[in-house]
Amino acid sequence: MGDIAVATGKVAKATSVARRAEPASRLGMATAGVLLVYYTIVFLIPFGVAIWLSFENWNFIDNHVFVGFANYTRALRDPYFWKALKITVLFSAVELAVTVPLSIFIAYLLSKVKGVPQRVLLAIYYLPVMIPTVVTVLLWQLLYLPTGGLVNGIFSALGLPQQLFLQSPNQALWSVTAMIIWAEIGGGIVLFLAGITTIPASLLEAAQLDGAGLWRQFRHVVLPYLRPIIFYQVVVSVIALVQMFTQFQLMNGPDFSTRTLAVYSYELGFQSDDLGLGAAVSVFIFILLFAATLAQLLRYKSIWED
Amino acid sequence: MAYRHAVSRSRLVGLGPALLVLLGAAAAFLPLLWFVFSAFKTRADILAVPVHLLPRKWTVKGFADLLSQTQLGRAYINSVILALMTLASVLFTSSLGGFVFARLRFPGRQAVFALVLGTTMVPFLTLLIPLYLVVAKMGLVDTYVGVWLPTAVSSFGIFLCRQYITTIPKDFYEAAKLDGANDFQIYWRIVVPLIRPVLAVLAVFNFLASFNNYLWPLVVLDDQKLYPLPLELAQMSQTLGITNYETVIAGALLTAVPGVVIFIALQRHILQGLNIGGVKG
């Protein structure tokens, strides 16, 4: 008996020594090396160049000139920059303020519908997410046509006055926002529904026995339970919303009324050939999103260290 | 008795939410329905007032014009080629990177993995202008490789695979190791088959993302022969524009087909797969 114990002890010790002495994996080094080269090309160099360019004046052709913080001060004095910033922040805030509560609410209602009907309804809500953005844009450009568009058609059937939508400087941004809510809400619903289905049934039953109706169960059980998922969804959404490009570039409303920072930075770089200012605006987007991207990174970190 | 009462009450309570949620789904579905039917309408019918859903006269003129007057077919081929390139490289690098960072020991492992995750700190928009300069310097403007390059590796994919692979017990490959299998054989014969579900989810989402890509191809492509679907469609709607609604709608509909077909076929996996990245785990 004792011999066996000693023997297995020895073996265990031997393997742990072997593990410690394991040579560095060549496959590991090769893979990491390739990744390092790849990310140097598509990430490290471009990021460095972005910061460097933001201190330069360049138009693709002439020699570039170091201008210090001039591009940043130019941006801060540029009314179009402020307009783009305002549009970006306003749009993102409104989109979130509508989408998050609405998707939680729909997910909660869906959680009360079980089985096949639930799956079919969920699929319908999610379907727009699967449609390419350019297609969504074309579709809604038609829906929003002042004459003959479906939205005004429904408005007139309801006795509401006809609107200009994308052709009005006051309505264009909110018309695009409504489209984006329609296109994106399915993602939130799927996420929140998955969260709700993990709520222990006993929690909801206890609330039910206490006489809590659907609304109070929602407020006091479901919402607190979902808080981490809500936080995650807000973080991920902010990062995506601030960077949204296709919709705003293709549905450009009158008077720059839908020109976000993303579109402005693109236009400065590739249409006005003002690379320095374009880079400064793009670095500003990085700063604007820093808290959100940091939260996302910390979340990755907390998962991998689990 | 009390239990049965509770059940029937909760069924009754379920009716109101079901109706609400049905109404919402109908509202969400209506634009898509209008779109599909409009592809089979005549030009005048599409925007006729008062608005109506079903075509007065069914026609496939939009689709016919699409074939004879546009290059959507070419754009389709471009999109498929680009998506397959992305898919191949993303699946390979994600699974291999995931395995390497999860299970192998080598110097610099932590640092490179930190770099992989660190890339998620910088918005793509911040990299856009310099990335164009880099790709131009490499002579890759107006090439498939130039379009593919920024999407070739997915840091999220590597992260996801790494998470999944750490949950596989080490015993699975200790035996293979004793049999003399090298690291790559272990990766290829043991790890890849085990993480197939994650790879399937990655495949679907990267395929769709590649099909949806607009901004980067817009920057890096001048030659319209290389345009993928979103660029071609946007271009088409500008040139055919106001006069040829039926053609544009037909083209848009065909552009949406792959995503919708994939979704209907793999609905369960997609809706569950979303939560791999979402709900903690």
Image: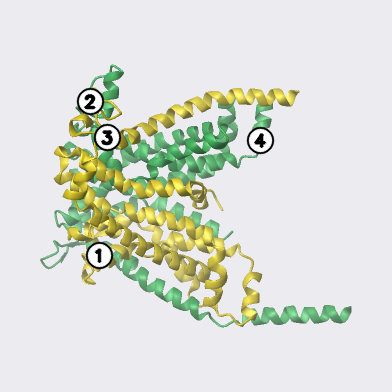
Chain colours: A green, B yellow
Residue A163: assigned label: 2
Q: Say whether disc 4 or disc 1 marks the residue closer to the N-terminus.
A: 1
Q: Which residue is mark 4?
A: A203
Q: Residue at x 64, y 70 (%)?
A: B172
The image quadrant where one finds the N terminus of chain B is top right
Q: Nearer the viewer, residue A192 or A227?
A: A192
**Mark earlier in primary sequence (1, 2):** 1
Q: Residue at x 65, y 80 (%)?
A: B178
Instruction: Check disc 4 and report its element: helix, strand or loop.
Output: helix
The answer to whether A42 is drawn above or below residue B239 in the figure is below
Tell which of A279 and B20 is nearer to you. B20
Q: Position of residue B170 (x, y in %)?
A: 63, 70
What's the chain of the residue with tag 3?
B
Identify the chain of the residue marked 1, using the numbered disc in the image. Answer: A
Mark 4 vs mark 1: tell me if same chain: yes
Q: Nearer the viewer, residue B80 or A71?
A: B80
* Cβ atoms at labels 1 and 2 below 8 Å apart: no
Q: Return the residue found at the far right.
A: A1
Label 4 chain ID: A
Could you confirm whether marks 1 and 2 are on the same chain? yes
Left or right: A274 in relation to A227: left
Marks 4 and 1 sit apart, C-alpha to C-alpha, by 55 Å
Measure the C-alpha gap from mark 3 to mark 2.
Answer: 22 Å
Camera-near label (4 vs 2) is: 2
Residue type marked 1: Trp
Bin the neighbour count of mark 2 within 10 Å (Cα to Cα): few under 14, some 14-19, many 20 and up.
some
Can residue A231 be seen from the camera position used here?
A: yes
Residue under label 3, please give it: B38
Name the residue located 27 percent from the left edge and 30 percent from the top edge: B55
Dot 2 lies on which element?
A: loop
Mark in front: 1 vs 3: 3
